[in-house]
Image (tube, grey):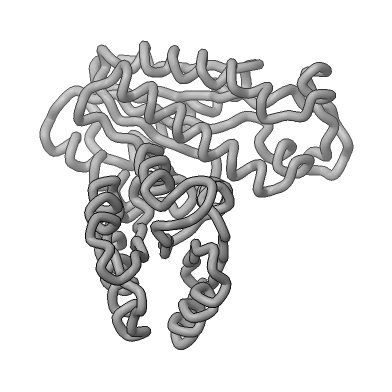
Amino acid sequence: MSLKILIVDDDPDIRDVLKLALAEENYTILEAEDGQEALDIITSKPLDLVLLDYKIPKFDGRQVVQQVKSDLLLRHLPIIMVTGKGELEDKIVGLDAGADDYITKPFEPKEVLARIRMALRRTERDLEANPLTRLPGNVSILNELSRRLESNSLFAVAYLDLDKFKSYNDKYGFESGDEVIRETARILIKAVHKKGNPDDFIGHIGGDDFVVITTPEKVDTICQLVIATFKEASPSFYNKEDREKGYIFARDRQGKEEKFSLLSISIGVVTNKSRKINHVAEIGEIGAELKGYAKSLEGNNYIKDQRK
């Protein structure tokens, strides 16, 4: 799968020069003419890197960088600022706003490619992540669970996924489904930052499945805040007609049309507070069982393991 690079410049000739410079690599190129169009693309499509001109209409490069880097899901996206020759102040302002690197016009194609490769390598090294949410993926999740087990510390692992997500995807399409997943990730991040510990962990298993690793005394308030926030956000994922009805019609797994309620979230919580857990696989098995039970209930729910 080719890497996606967004070129942002209001000068079509500059965009063509950059596209030509990148032609020898197998990159998928997207283009934007101004800061607003750039932000629309950045927030709606998974990208690997942005080449961003400093002087663009609507939002300048500094404002685009600030917005991207303030979004918890996008802050790891590498941005290379493109500035005019001798415009030292633009370089400094861009880097201060959070740009990862800069190149100066007129540029050498080989330098552009070298800086892109360097930024991509650095991001890949720093972040083993789900490409949609930029949250840590399965390798990091397993490593974190193993670390908690080896340290013999008390932990609570919340497994979360969305109910009725397939029917939502079928009706509204994958782009809308991806935005729901990104918004769910934002809800988790904000809840953990507000109610959790500084070293709590949030991971994206894949699809609409997430995991939060925290401590037993924090997990209830985190789950309650996640559920309250998701319940409030869920109607906004639908058009006015479906929102007012409170349901949609979509096909079930057997292909029959059925009525589905609005998206909700189910959480299964595994903790070693009252029982000894010896292996990572054990955490996953208990979590799947608890989450399955939470999903059998209507609406937003979390179920915590109480067995000794």
Residue in the foreground of this view, choosing between 12 and 183: 12
Q: Decide if residue 134 is in sight here.
A: no
Say above or below: 237 vs 117: above
Q: Decide if residue 94 is in sight here.
A: yes
Residue lying farthest to the right in this orientation: 257
Residue at 24% in and 41% down = 144
Q: Is residue 219 left or right of residue 267?
A: left
Q: Is residue 284 left or right of residue 26?
A: left
Residue 223: name its quadrant: top left
Say above or below: 55 vs 158: below
Name the spot of residue 135 as percent of width and height, x first.
38, 44
Name the spot of residue 113 as percent of width and height, x first.
35, 79
Residue at 41% in and 40% down = 67
Residue at 49% in and 74% down = 14
Residue 261: name its quadrant: top right
Residue at 43% in and 31% down = 159
Say above or below: 11 vs 183: below
Q: Quadrant of the C terminus?
A: top left
